[in-house]
Structures are given as C-alpha cells and as structure tokens.
Image (spheres, grey):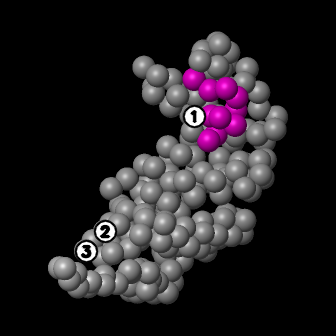
Amino acid sequence: MSQITKRALETSLKNLLLQKPLHKITISDIATDCGINRMTFYYHFKDIYDLIEWICMEETARAINGKKTYETWQQGFLQTFQMVLDNKPFISNVYHSISREKIEDYFYAITYDLLIGVIEEKAIGMNVSEANKKFIANFYNFAFVGLLMDWIKKDMQEDPQLIINQLSTLIHGEVSRALNKYQVKKTNQIHKND
C-alpha cells in the first residue's frame, strides 16, 4: 500500500508540474490532486524535495535495473537518458528549482551502482584494491553524470544514442586498461627454514 501511495503522489506532482513551476506547488496542492490528506503525505515524505529525491532515485533505478554488466552498461546509460527525456517537464522543473548539486547527487548515487558492478565484473581474477576500484568507478561516474547534466542544461536537444555511442567509443577497453594499471603485482617470497 505504501508504494501505491508514493506512486500516486509522484503522479500528482508530475501532473502539477505541467501546470505550474515547482516553487508554486504546495503539499496541499499535491495532497488535493492525489485525493489524500496532508498527514498522509507526511507519513511518506518529509517535504516536496524528499518526494522529488525519491522520484529521481526510483526512476533512475528502474532505468538501469539489470544493466550492471560490461555488456549492458551502455543500455543502462541510454535508458537513463531516455527516462530523463520521458520526464522532461519534471526534470526541467527540478533542474531549475533546486540546486544542480542535488540533482547530480541523485544521479551519482544510482549510476555509481551500475559502474561499480561493471568494474567488479572486469576485475574478477585481478588483484585490485577496493579503494582503486571505487576510484575508477567514480572517475567514469563523474564523466557520465557531467554529460547527462550538460545535456539537461541544453534542454535535452541532442540524440541520447549519439552521446552513448561517443562515450562507448571513447572508453572501449579503458576499464580493463585502468584495472590493469592499478593491479597489485603478487611477489613471490622465498622462506628459508632455519
């Protein structure tokens, strides 16, 4: 029941954003549109920004669900762009109403999961520290989220498939190369018995 109510609140907020900007929408507006009382809203979310964060996390998680392998990461990223495009009024309103850093945080959190999954897969059988794997995942995460945010800033005009194709060409084989550079070589030690 909780998920159904959250989804209904999401739908109401998205409907209202087609009519007016985020800064003019109140919790009462959302509750009325949704057919619930204000206390029900507060049972699920502390404020509108909490609802926005939940929507962003849910939408992005759905977009990349099951796309956390080396063979599927491009599809996961493409579906993230497509999700943003499908929710253009919502994303544009959020982008212009709250700080860019907040939106970036939503995308960083979700796409990091995709990237660390790819890194872990490619690192099987390699001696690479967790810290170095995280560093590599963060490097690619910043690149991807930067491209996504620039695309949103430019009103989502460029074809997402073209962006993903360019990104794929640029990093093809680079994940394995990066892991190789960070691999700790095992040293053989000869122990002498006294």
Point out which mark residue 158 bears. none
Q: State the count of labels.
A: 3
Coordinates of residue 144 in the picture (x, y in percent): 56, 70
Q: Amino acid at mark 3?
A: Gly
Q: Quadrant of residue 1?
A: top left
> Quadrant where the C terminus lies?
bottom left
Residue on which disc 3 sits: 125
Q: Secondary structure at mark 1?
A: helix
Q: Residue furthest right?
A: 24
Residue on which disc 2 sits: 121
Report the span colored magenta.
44-53
Q: Secondary structure at mark 3?
A: loop
Q: Residue at x 44, y 81 (%)?
A: 182
Q: Is residue 175 visible?
A: yes
Coordinates of residue 29 in the picture (x, y in percent): 72, 24
Alpha-carbon span between mark 1 and mark 2: 34 Å
Does the magenta portion include 51? yes
- Chief SS of the magenta region: helix
In front of the other: label 1 or label 2? 2
Query: Looking at the image, is mark 1 or mark 2 earlier in the sequence?
Result: 1
Q: Amino acid at mark 2?
A: Glu
Residue on which disc 1 sits: 10
Coordinates of residue 185 in the picture (x, y in percent): 34, 84
Alpha-carbon span between mark 3 and mark 2: 9 Å
Q: Quadrant of residue 120?
A: bottom left
Q: Is residue 80 visible?
A: no
Query: Looking at the image, is mark 1 or mark 3 earlier in the sequence?
Result: 1
Q: Camera-side residue: 17 or 99?
A: 99
